[in-house]
Amino acid sequence: MGVLQGKVVLVTGAGRGVGREIALLAARQGAKVVVNDLGGTMDGRNEGLPDPAEEVVEEIRATGGEAIADTNSVSDRAGADAMVAKALEAFGGLHAVANPAGILRDRMFHNMGDDDWRSVIDVHLTGSYNVARAAIEHFRKQEDGVLVFFTSSAGLVGNIGQANYSAAKLGIVGLSRSIALEGARKNIRSNVVAPFAWTRMLASIPVKSEEQGLRLARLREAMRSDQVAHPVVALMADGAKDVTGQILALRGNEIILMSQPRPSRSVVRMEGWSPETVLSHGFPALSGHLVPLEGTNEVFNWEVV
Protein backbone atom coordinates (compact mmCIF):
# COMPACT_ATOMS: atom_id res chain seq x y z
CA MET A 1 0.00 0.00 0.00
CA GLY A 2 1.19 3.48 -0.85
CA VAL A 3 1.22 6.53 1.40
CA LEU A 4 -1.79 7.97 -0.46
CA GLN A 5 -3.88 4.81 -0.53
CA GLY A 6 -7.57 5.74 -0.53
CA LYS A 7 -6.91 9.43 -1.18
CA VAL A 8 -8.19 11.60 -4.01
CA VAL A 9 -5.70 14.17 -5.26
CA LEU A 10 -6.02 17.11 -7.65
CA VAL A 11 -2.83 18.21 -9.40
CA THR A 12 -2.88 21.33 -11.57
CA GLY A 13 -0.46 21.91 -14.41
CA ALA A 14 0.00 18.15 -14.39
CA GLY A 15 0.51 17.60 -18.10
CA ARG A 16 4.22 18.32 -18.04
CA GLY A 17 7.21 18.85 -15.80
CA VAL A 18 6.85 18.82 -12.03
CA GLY A 19 3.06 18.53 -12.10
CA ARG A 20 3.22 15.45 -14.32
CA GLU A 21 5.69 13.74 -12.00
CA ILE A 22 3.52 14.52 -8.96
CA ALA A 23 0.44 13.08 -10.64
CA LEU A 24 2.24 9.90 -11.71
CA LEU A 25 3.82 9.36 -8.28
CA ALA A 26 0.57 10.09 -6.44
CA ALA A 27 -1.12 7.40 -8.54
CA ARG A 28 1.68 4.92 -7.83
CA GLN A 29 1.22 5.70 -4.14
CA GLY A 30 -2.44 4.71 -4.29
CA ALA A 31 -4.26 7.97 -4.98
CA LYS A 32 -7.01 8.57 -7.49
CA VAL A 33 -5.87 11.59 -9.44
CA VAL A 34 -7.55 14.49 -11.22
CA VAL A 35 -4.94 15.54 -13.78
CA ASN A 36 -5.50 19.19 -14.67
CA ASP A 37 -3.71 20.91 -17.51
CA LEU A 38 -4.95 23.60 -19.85
CA GLY A 39 -2.33 22.78 -22.47
CA GLY A 40 -0.76 25.52 -24.50
CA THR A 41 2.58 27.26 -24.50
CA MET A 42 4.82 28.24 -21.62
CA ASP A 43 3.63 31.85 -21.72
CA GLY A 44 0.02 30.74 -21.22
CA ARG A 45 -1.19 31.12 -24.77
CA ASN A 46 -3.19 28.11 -25.85
CA GLU A 47 -2.31 27.27 -29.42
CA GLY A 48 -4.22 24.05 -29.92
CA LEU A 49 -1.44 21.80 -28.71
CA PRO A 50 -2.08 18.10 -27.90
CA ASP A 51 -3.92 17.45 -24.65
CA PRO A 52 -1.15 16.71 -22.12
CA ALA A 53 -3.62 15.99 -19.30
CA GLU A 54 -5.19 13.11 -21.21
CA GLU A 55 -1.75 11.71 -22.04
CA VAL A 56 -0.87 11.55 -18.33
CA VAL A 57 -4.23 9.96 -17.52
CA GLU A 58 -3.59 7.27 -20.11
CA GLU A 59 -0.15 6.64 -18.61
CA ILE A 60 -1.65 6.25 -15.12
CA ARG A 61 -4.39 3.93 -16.33
CA ALA A 62 -1.87 1.83 -18.24
CA THR A 63 -0.22 0.93 -14.93
CA GLY A 64 -3.51 0.11 -13.20
CA GLY A 65 -4.15 3.49 -11.58
CA GLU A 66 -7.28 5.62 -11.61
CA ALA A 67 -7.29 9.12 -13.08
CA ILE A 68 -9.39 11.58 -15.01
CA ALA A 69 -8.37 14.60 -17.06
CA ASP A 70 -9.43 18.21 -16.65
CA THR A 71 -8.58 21.09 -18.97
CA ASN A 72 -9.93 24.07 -17.03
CA SER A 73 -7.74 27.07 -16.33
CA VAL A 74 -6.71 27.80 -12.74
CA SER A 75 -7.07 31.50 -13.52
CA ASP A 76 -10.84 31.02 -13.93
CA ARG A 77 -12.75 30.68 -10.66
CA ALA A 78 -15.55 28.70 -12.30
CA GLY A 79 -12.92 26.41 -13.81
CA ALA A 80 -11.40 25.79 -10.38
CA ASP A 81 -14.84 24.99 -8.98
CA ALA A 82 -15.32 22.55 -11.83
CA MET A 83 -12.07 20.72 -11.02
CA VAL A 84 -13.17 20.10 -7.45
CA ALA A 85 -16.67 19.11 -8.57
CA LYS A 86 -15.15 16.65 -11.03
CA ALA A 87 -13.11 15.01 -8.26
CA LEU A 88 -16.17 14.68 -6.03
CA GLU A 89 -18.35 13.32 -8.82
CA ALA A 90 -15.84 10.87 -10.26
CA PHE A 91 -14.15 9.63 -7.10
CA GLY A 92 -16.47 10.65 -4.27
CA GLY A 93 -13.98 12.82 -2.44
CA LEU A 94 -10.98 15.11 -2.42
CA HIS A 95 -8.18 15.02 0.14
CA ALA A 96 -5.27 17.00 -1.30
CA VAL A 97 -4.45 19.62 -3.91
CA ALA A 98 -1.04 20.34 -5.42
CA ASN A 99 -0.96 23.51 -7.51
CA PRO A 100 2.20 23.83 -9.64
CA ALA A 101 0.37 25.28 -12.67
CA GLY A 102 2.25 28.27 -13.99
CA ILE A 103 3.40 30.43 -16.89
CA LEU A 104 6.24 32.86 -17.54
CA ARG A 105 6.21 36.29 -19.15
CA ASP A 106 9.75 37.43 -18.32
CA ARG A 107 10.56 41.10 -18.92
CA MET A 108 12.76 43.68 -17.33
CA PHE A 109 10.41 45.75 -15.19
CA HIS A 110 10.83 48.90 -17.27
CA ASN A 111 9.75 46.91 -20.34
CA MET A 112 6.88 45.03 -18.70
CA GLY A 113 3.46 45.46 -20.22
CA ASP A 114 0.23 45.41 -18.26
CA ASP A 115 -0.78 42.12 -19.89
CA ASP A 116 2.54 40.52 -18.89
CA TRP A 117 1.84 41.54 -15.30
CA ARG A 118 -1.81 40.52 -15.17
CA SER A 119 -1.35 37.18 -16.92
CA VAL A 120 1.32 35.96 -14.51
CA ILE A 121 -0.53 37.22 -11.43
CA ASP A 122 -3.77 35.65 -12.71
CA VAL A 123 -2.27 32.19 -13.17
CA HIS A 124 0.07 32.00 -10.19
CA LEU A 125 -1.42 34.06 -7.38
CA THR A 126 -5.09 34.28 -8.34
CA GLY A 127 -4.94 30.72 -9.65
CA SER A 128 -3.63 29.51 -6.30
CA TYR A 129 -6.46 31.36 -4.60
CA ASN A 130 -9.08 29.98 -7.00
CA VAL A 131 -8.14 26.34 -6.56
CA ALA A 132 -7.72 26.60 -2.79
CA ARG A 133 -10.98 28.49 -2.42
CA ALA A 134 -12.77 25.87 -4.49
CA ALA A 135 -11.51 23.08 -2.22
CA ILE A 136 -11.60 24.72 1.20
CA GLU A 137 -15.30 24.27 2.03
CA HIS A 138 -15.09 20.56 1.29
CA PHE A 139 -11.95 20.27 3.42
CA ARG A 140 -13.66 22.09 6.30
CA LYS A 141 -16.72 19.85 6.18
CA GLN A 142 -14.66 16.66 6.27
CA GLU A 143 -12.20 18.25 8.73
CA ASP A 144 -9.27 17.06 6.68
CA GLY A 145 -7.38 18.39 3.69
CA VAL A 146 -3.97 19.29 2.34
CA LEU A 147 -2.87 22.16 0.12
CA VAL A 148 0.58 22.22 -1.44
CA PHE A 149 1.33 25.57 -3.04
CA PHE A 150 4.27 26.39 -5.25
CA THR A 151 6.54 29.37 -4.73
CA SER A 152 9.96 30.03 -6.26
CA SER A 153 13.37 31.32 -5.34
CA ALA A 154 12.39 34.24 -7.56
CA GLY A 155 9.80 35.14 -4.93
CA LEU A 156 11.76 34.17 -1.83
CA VAL A 157 15.05 35.75 -2.96
CA GLY A 158 14.24 37.80 -6.05
CA ASN A 159 15.33 37.59 -9.66
CA ILE A 160 16.15 39.98 -12.46
CA GLY A 161 13.56 40.11 -15.25
CA GLN A 162 10.83 38.42 -13.23
CA ALA A 163 9.12 41.13 -11.16
CA ASN A 164 5.67 39.79 -12.11
CA TYR A 165 6.59 36.18 -11.31
CA SER A 166 8.43 37.15 -8.10
CA ALA A 167 5.49 39.20 -6.82
CA ALA A 168 3.04 36.37 -7.49
CA LYS A 169 5.25 33.73 -5.93
CA LEU A 170 5.88 35.67 -2.73
CA GLY A 171 2.17 36.41 -2.50
CA ILE A 172 1.53 32.67 -2.54
CA VAL A 173 3.70 32.31 0.58
CA GLY A 174 1.45 34.71 2.49
CA LEU A 175 -1.66 32.98 1.18
CA SER A 176 -0.47 29.57 2.33
CA ARG A 177 0.62 30.79 5.75
CA SER A 178 -2.75 32.38 6.47
CA ILE A 179 -4.63 29.29 5.30
CA ALA A 180 -2.43 27.14 7.57
CA LEU A 181 -3.20 29.33 10.58
CA GLU A 182 -6.94 29.41 9.84
CA GLY A 183 -7.18 25.75 8.92
CA ALA A 184 -5.39 24.22 11.90
CA ARG A 185 -8.60 23.73 13.92
CA LYS A 186 -10.16 21.81 11.02
CA ASN A 187 -7.11 19.62 10.36
CA ILE A 188 -6.35 21.50 7.13
CA ARG A 189 -2.65 21.73 6.32
CA SER A 190 -1.04 24.16 3.91
CA ASN A 191 2.59 24.29 2.86
CA VAL A 192 4.66 25.89 0.12
CA VAL A 193 7.44 24.29 -1.88
CA ALA A 194 10.03 26.05 -4.01
CA PRO A 195 11.15 23.52 -6.63
CA PHE A 196 14.48 23.61 -8.37
CA ALA A 197 13.90 21.37 -11.38
CA TRP A 198 14.69 21.21 -15.07
CA THR A 199 11.46 22.09 -16.81
CA ARG A 200 10.56 23.88 -20.02
CA MET A 201 10.71 27.10 -17.95
CA LEU A 202 14.38 26.57 -17.11
CA ALA A 203 15.03 25.33 -20.63
CA SER A 204 13.80 28.69 -21.93
CA ILE A 205 16.71 30.58 -20.32
CA PRO A 206 18.87 32.00 -23.15
CA VAL A 207 22.45 30.70 -23.09
CA LYS A 208 24.80 33.67 -23.37
CA SER A 209 28.16 32.02 -22.68
CA GLU A 210 29.88 28.64 -22.80
CA GLU A 211 30.16 28.70 -19.01
CA GLN A 212 26.42 29.27 -18.62
CA GLY A 213 25.72 26.50 -21.11
CA LEU A 214 27.83 24.03 -19.13
CA ARG A 215 26.15 25.06 -15.89
CA LEU A 216 22.67 24.57 -17.35
CA ALA A 217 23.71 21.16 -18.65
CA ARG A 218 24.79 20.16 -15.13
CA LEU A 219 21.52 21.43 -13.70
CA ARG A 220 19.55 19.40 -16.21
CA GLU A 221 21.12 16.22 -14.89
CA ALA A 222 21.15 17.19 -11.19
CA MET A 223 17.69 18.74 -10.75
CA ARG A 224 15.00 16.44 -12.10
CA SER A 225 11.27 16.92 -11.83
CA ASP A 226 10.77 13.46 -10.34
CA GLN A 227 12.98 14.45 -7.38
CA VAL A 228 10.54 17.25 -6.52
CA ALA A 229 7.54 14.91 -6.62
CA HIS A 230 8.58 12.74 -3.67
CA PRO A 231 8.47 15.43 -0.93
CA VAL A 232 5.27 16.88 -2.42
CA VAL A 233 3.51 13.53 -2.28
CA ALA A 234 4.84 13.01 1.25
CA LEU A 235 3.31 16.35 2.30
CA MET A 236 -0.08 15.07 1.16
CA ALA A 237 0.19 11.89 3.24
CA ASP A 238 -1.26 11.38 6.71
CA GLY A 239 2.26 10.85 8.03
CA ALA A 240 2.96 14.57 7.57
CA LYS A 241 0.13 15.82 9.80
CA ASP A 242 2.57 17.85 11.93
CA VAL A 243 3.98 19.73 8.93
CA THR A 244 2.01 22.86 8.09
CA GLY A 245 2.69 26.52 7.44
CA GLN A 246 6.18 25.73 6.16
CA ILE A 247 8.32 26.67 3.14
CA LEU A 248 10.47 23.91 1.69
CA ALA A 249 12.99 24.41 -1.10
CA LEU A 250 13.45 21.20 -3.09
CA ARG A 251 16.76 21.02 -4.93
CA GLY A 252 18.11 17.78 -6.32
CA ASN A 253 18.25 15.41 -3.36
CA GLU A 254 17.99 18.24 -0.83
CA ILE A 255 14.96 19.25 1.23
CA ILE A 256 15.74 22.72 2.56
CA LEU A 257 13.57 24.22 5.30
CA MET A 258 13.44 27.94 4.54
CA SER A 259 13.36 30.66 7.16
CA GLN A 260 10.36 32.97 7.33
CA PRO A 261 10.35 36.71 8.04
CA ARG A 262 10.86 37.41 11.74
CA PRO A 263 12.36 40.44 13.54
CA SER A 264 16.15 40.31 13.27
CA ARG A 265 17.30 43.65 14.75
CA SER A 266 15.73 46.77 16.25
CA VAL A 267 16.93 50.20 17.24
CA VAL A 268 15.13 52.55 19.62
CA ARG A 269 15.42 56.27 20.27
CA MET A 270 13.37 57.11 23.35
CA GLU A 271 12.86 60.74 22.40
CA GLY A 272 11.55 59.72 18.99
CA TRP A 273 12.98 59.88 15.50
CA SER A 274 13.48 62.58 12.94
CA PRO A 275 14.63 62.02 9.35
CA GLU A 276 18.05 63.36 10.41
CA THR A 277 18.46 60.95 13.34
CA VAL A 278 17.20 58.01 11.28
CA LEU A 279 20.02 58.80 8.85
CA SER A 280 22.67 59.48 11.49
CA HIS A 281 21.72 56.81 14.02
CA GLY A 282 18.94 54.44 12.88
CA PHE A 283 20.20 53.19 9.55
CA PRO A 284 23.88 52.98 10.67
CA ALA A 285 22.83 50.87 13.67
CA LEU A 286 21.04 48.46 11.34
CA SER A 287 23.60 48.48 8.54
CA GLY A 288 25.43 45.34 9.59
CA HIS A 289 22.19 43.37 9.51
CA LEU A 290 20.67 44.54 6.22
CA VAL A 291 19.82 41.74 3.79
CA PRO A 292 22.39 41.75 0.97
CA LEU A 293 21.19 42.47 -2.56
CA GLU A 294 21.77 38.90 -3.75
CA GLY A 295 20.06 36.73 -6.31
CA THR A 296 19.28 33.01 -6.28
CA ASN A 297 22.75 31.95 -7.40
CA GLU A 298 24.39 33.88 -4.56
CA VAL A 299 22.01 32.54 -1.89
CA PHE A 300 22.04 28.92 -3.09
CA ASN A 301 25.75 29.05 -3.81
CA TRP A 302 26.69 25.39 -3.38
CA GLU A 303 26.60 22.65 -5.98
CA VAL A 304 23.40 20.66 -6.31
CA VAL A 305 23.56 17.50 -4.21
Image (spheres, rainbow, N blue to C red):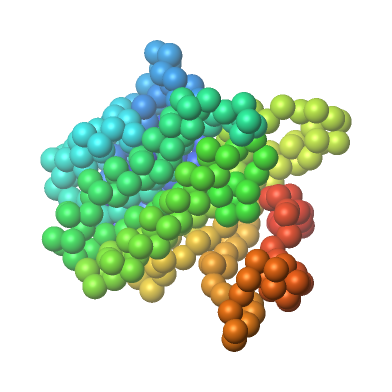
Q: Quadrant of residue 33?
A: top left
Q: Residue at x 63, y 48 (%)?
A: 158
Q: Is residue 204 left or right of residue 85?
A: right
* Position of the C terminus by quadrant: bottom right
Residue 143 seen in the current view: yes
Depth order, front residue of 53/66? 53
Q: Examine the rendered structure and indicate whether residue 118 appears above or below residue 51.
A: below
Residue 2 seen in the current view: no
Q: Is residue 256 left or right of residue 71?
A: right
Place of residue 290 in the rendered image (x, y in percent of width and height, measured from the top left): 70, 66
Depth order, front residue of 4/70? 70
Q: Residue at x 40, y 13 (%)?
A: 48
Residue at the top extreme of this rendering: 48
Place of residue 279 in the rendered image (x, y in percent of width and height, measured from the top left): 72, 67
Q: Examine the rendered structure and indicate whether residue 225 appears above or below residue 70.
A: below
* Position of the N terminus by quadrant: bottom left
Residue at the bottom extreme of this rendering: 270
Q: Quadrant of residue 267?
A: bottom right
